[in-house]
Image: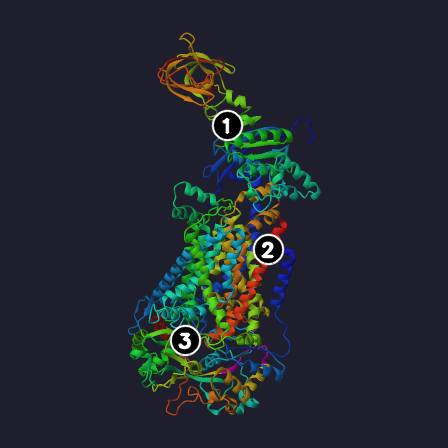
Amino acid sequence: MTKPTATSSQLSSAVIAEEKRLRGTRYGLLAPGILTIFIIGIMPLSIVLVYSFLKPGDFGGVTWELSFEAYVQLLFEEDIFDETLSFTTDYLEIFWRSVGLGLVTTIACLLVGFPTAYFIATQPPARRNAWLFLITIPFWTNLLIRTYAMLLILRDQGMINLSLIKIGVIDRALPLLYTDFAVSLGLVYAYLPFMVLPIFASLEKLDFRLVEAGYDLYATRFRVLKRIIIPLAKPGIAAGCILVLIPSLGAYITPALLGGGKKLMIGNLIELQFGQARNWPFGSAIALVLMVLVMLSLLIYLRSGGRKGASARKSIDLKYQPGFSQIAWFCIVVLYAPIAVLVLFSFNQNRSVTVWTEFSFDWYVKAAQNEGIQHAAWVSLEVAFIAMVISTILATMAALVTTRTPPYRGLNAAITVINQPLMVPEVVTAVATLIFFAIIKQATGVTGIGYLIAAHTAFCIPFAYMPIRARLEDMDLSLEQAAADLYAPPFKVFRRVTLPLMMPGIMAGAMLAFIVSLDDVIITLFVAGPGETTLPLYILGQIRRGVTPEINAVSTLFLGISVILVTLIFLFGTNKNKGKQ
Amino acid sequence: MSDQTAQAAIDVRNTSKIYGRDREHGVVALDQVSLTIEDNEFFTLLGPSGCGKTTLLRLIAGFEQPTHGEILLFGEHLEGLPPYQRPVNTVFQHYALFPHMTVAENISFGLEMLERPAAEIKPVVDEVLGLVQMEHLADRKTDQLSGGQQQRVALARALAPRPKVLLLDEPLSALDFKLRKEMQVELKRLQSETGITFIFVTHDQEEALAMSDRVAVMRDGLILQVGDPSEIYDRPAKRFVADFIGDINILRGSVVSSQGDKARVKLETGYEGEAGLPAGADDLGNRVSVAIRPEQLSFADNAIAADLSGSIQHISYFGSGFDYEVLMPSGESVTLQVQNRGAGQHDYAIGDEVHIAIGANSMQILSD
Amino acid sequence: MKQKLLTTIMATCLTFAMGSVQAAGELHIYNWGNYTNPEMIEKFEKMHDVKVTLDGYDSNETMLAKVEQGGSGYDIVVPGDYMIAIMIKKGLLEKVEPNKMSNFKNVDPKWVDVYWDKGRNYSIPYQWGTTNFTVDKTVYKGDINTLALMFDPPEELKGRINMLKDMNDVINAGLRYLGYPRCNSDKAQLKELNSMLVKAKANWRTMDYSVIEKLTSKDVDLSQSWNGAAKRARKDRPELAYAYPKEGFTGWMDNVAVLKGAPNLENAKLFMNFMMTPEAAAMTSNFANYANGIIGSEAMMNADLTAAPEIVMPASAPAPEFVPPCAQEVTDLYSKIWTNLNK
């Protein structure tokens, strides 16, 4: 590899200078993102790695003694009777179930998300934005709450069963809840925007003349879709699949709520080890195995040419695909049904979240008096906003270096590092970050909400990075060259050409980051300090002891505010554009 | 810039571009090319795709750096200068117009980047818009324009900053025939009006011959021949050049004697005559290829006046004339091109035995 | 403009990173979610001019993981009995000696010499209760005071059962049903337990902590539950009855304790003393629906609480058993059974 070649000594100094310049920009742009993830993501992980080779401590924690027991335990068990080691399938079964469920979720998200994204991308620009906001608004409401609302719809005495019984289709309640079906539905529901947004960012750039070319060459609607649209939208599809598959692999709150908690997922299994089972090394080992699996699949994706620069130019021409608009509308209905239930029950007079009695504003009054909820809501917004801004900036810089410079050694490594927070189940990141931050806190004496924001920023980066990168990959490189040719130095090229053109990707990325931060439970649970309870944490604390409709009221308010906010941004944005024209 | 003699606009010196690790393991896109382009010249790089013409253009523009060699712009070294510091502009193949800006914004972009005062920019934009006859569309977004209009905007955008050299990367390839013809004239007019050196890249030999002051024919990263259009057409140096530009008959023959740039050749058909000899082709050996343009051949009335003879195999009509393909006893065939003299009549039919005369000074010996 | 925005954001971040200034009179409480009466907190704040922040956790283990690393910033935690034992052993609690505080006289003597904190050198009672199950009497009309309803249910309850998703609660109930001791490392007995649980699981619909909701929504007709939750569920579903199985059951107590290195040690002590007043204890009970261990609080407690069959145990019921934390080898065996049960 390092063999000096005869020609290398004669390389023109311009090539060397150019290479130097590129390397400079590359490091300059990549460094902040990588550094953030390295410090907040990878350092804690090395703690997990070390732990997996130690022995469990008494009542949790670890004993500093080298041991491979944790890894042996994964595949073999000591028989309760004769103490011989034998092969065990318990953990493999749990792994397999999680992977299966993850795949089903991903496929379902793709089946619903692709047509939706396509439909949105083929709308006129103004309506396109409206649709996009329509898709994201439900996600401004906390996931726990929405999952609870789904419970209300699916259960034996829920809306579906009651109405089916009423119209006489069935006479006994269908067991919808506490099934694998319910879990998949919940996961699809939770991760759908992670699929829609990147695909949209990719499709939005699609040159629809290519579609016409397809029809011209005797392709049917379906074949145009299969042979032209889908291959061209590949970067977005791949990004979407990764964003859905990986979090759903580690998911544990949704499966616990909707699945009835009778079956463990990998996430539950890991949580069990850090909790009641008090076996941190084993928990660490499972987490690492999961991480390696995820990393392998990500590498395969990178190898199989996930990055392909397609040059495409814009056209306003629309192409209709049968059924896609229906799917998009269906998507909206599904997304909003739990929200509707939530809003409805926020006006319920009864204390129970399940039985409707009478219309009242009681819970709004209660919420207005509840300092705890208000404070939590405020902390949530604050953390989510700051984390969104920082992570989007870092992700944008990182996306530029991973798409806009010629391939270089370490490119794949850089991409892997950026995606690292995605590859680790949340529980593990949470525990590792907790330990890591505790060390820093004790060493420096600095406390405060900065830690929580830093942790949120780190795991928001990959979510912001994916759609931005998908957008950049689809962008015509010659536009930037044209700008450089017209005397724009790199920064101005970026500001005047690259940035405006990648804006849809950045918006999608920022929204994802915001949602992800707003919904985070587990990492926040471990990292948050005194007085830093976020809304999800507040809700989680209530779940065991019974949720009150106060939460519904707050969520409804949250929803209302976000709708107003988004509408304002939207209107402001269009006006500004009009002014320019 | 002190010397008084006219300086070359572009001086490419022994420049190579290699993609990949080195010559053995990579792709040689440009192979030790040297080229001088004079000021105020309409210069064309002509060749099939993959010949290195676009690479050369991108090296001049600064999008890529040469692996070896150097490029001078009016005597100044370009080495290490990024594209935005080179007084050179490009018209891109697919125009690369900024979709988020209007026509006027696109055109003023370069001037803004050069930090010209706004008061100065406006008249220039108007002037350039006038130059390409696009005044009425100044406030359109670029994706609302037709192909020809986009082409004009791209031209205007590249001309507005008054570059010392304008690079055009196959800018006409996406236009229809009529529009292309129009734009050829337009480009030529713009070049002479502005006095800017144009470097034009194309694979269309007709386009190259019609517009250029000089043409460089390229293949496989090498420049095969540089010359004005008639030199390139009438005195092709290499078999590839002859073949690539226009239609050509190539016949086998042998050199009887040679002197200077002339030689006596004897064709395999038996005909013996004088042919042009390419420079530096002393060691061609005995057996050579001899090129004759189809329009240099004509039908002879009788066998005495004939230089060649054979039977007509195929006739094709193309409006302004006919191509006759004649198979000769040597097994070779030649094509004659004859002007259309009357309303669709032709004098000969397939199968006719015919005699052919070769025009004076029309034979050219080719090297491979 | 962008520059300005960036600066603002940076400044905001910095401000937060520095944390709020430590004013005299702060107290950081880390308690189970929805378990602290805000009126009680308000009263304490007014009494001692202290600003209280309150955060919630969802399990003893989460709390432990968080405070174990140090630097959590909390003063007060409210761990369950076995967790107090663990935390004392790990040296995580400050020995504040509540037994020498002025209000210690109010503590019911039966909660003084407890296994998790003999003589009360570290902690005081917060709330206590039992873990049993509650069942719809109209669905199952027979005798409810037997664990058989969970582990070998009659036809009408099959598929209508929720268990707590709690390894120790399920395994301990199973051991009692089989008549075996707690913290059991006898492999033959555990093997029997394992197969009994696997068989019983087929009849369970869910395993979840959200008991009240499962019962009131009629998703299940029997649920393992804490007594306070059973009482609250009964409010919306009066047919429910809380069982006191003859095989025995778990009792538990959550305790107020002070973390080692608490930033506001003196205020924490004040709070501890305050929590031993009958008023504070009664306020907590009225909010959380469990009994406390403070004498004299009954008078101020809601009538429905002091009369509730879930809170007041019948004389015939066996005494609740407070299960100490088991050794790691036992926990390892338990978690194997638990994983196998949940796979």
In this rendering, would A12 be left or right of B310?
right
What residue sits right under mark 3 in the picture? C217
State the residue lying farthest toward the top: B304
Q: In this view, does C317 lie above or below B131?
A: below
Q: How many labels does the image show?
A: 3
Q: Looking at the picture, how far across and down is residue A266, in whole percent?
A: 40, 66
Mark 1 nearby-residue class (10 Å; few <14, some 14–19, many ≥20): many
Question: Is residue B117 among what the camera can see?
Answer: no
Same chain for marks 1 and 3?
no
Rendered-image quadrant of the C terminus of chain C? bottom left
Q: What residue type is labelled 2?
A: Gly
Q: Is mark 2 on a helix, strand or loop?
A: helix
Chain letter belonging to callout 3: C
Q: Nearer the viewer, mark 1 or mark 3?
A: 3
* Residue B286 shown in magenta: no
Q: What residue type is labelled 3?
A: Ser
What residue sits right under mark 1 in the picture? B205
Q: Which mark is residue A143?
A: none
Question: Is residue A161 among what the camera can see?
Answer: yes
Q: Looking at the picture, how far across and down is residue A258, in whole percent?
A: 40, 69
A347 vs A534, nearest the viewer: A347
Q: Which mark is residue A573?
A: 2
Q: In this view, does B324 lie above or below A307?
A: above
Q: What stretch is highlighted in magenta?
A: C255-265
Mark 2 nearby-residue class (10 Å; few <14, some 14–19, many ≥20): few
Mark 3 nearby-residue class (10 Å; few <14, some 14–19, many ≥20): many
Q: In this view, does B237 lie above or below A534?
A: above
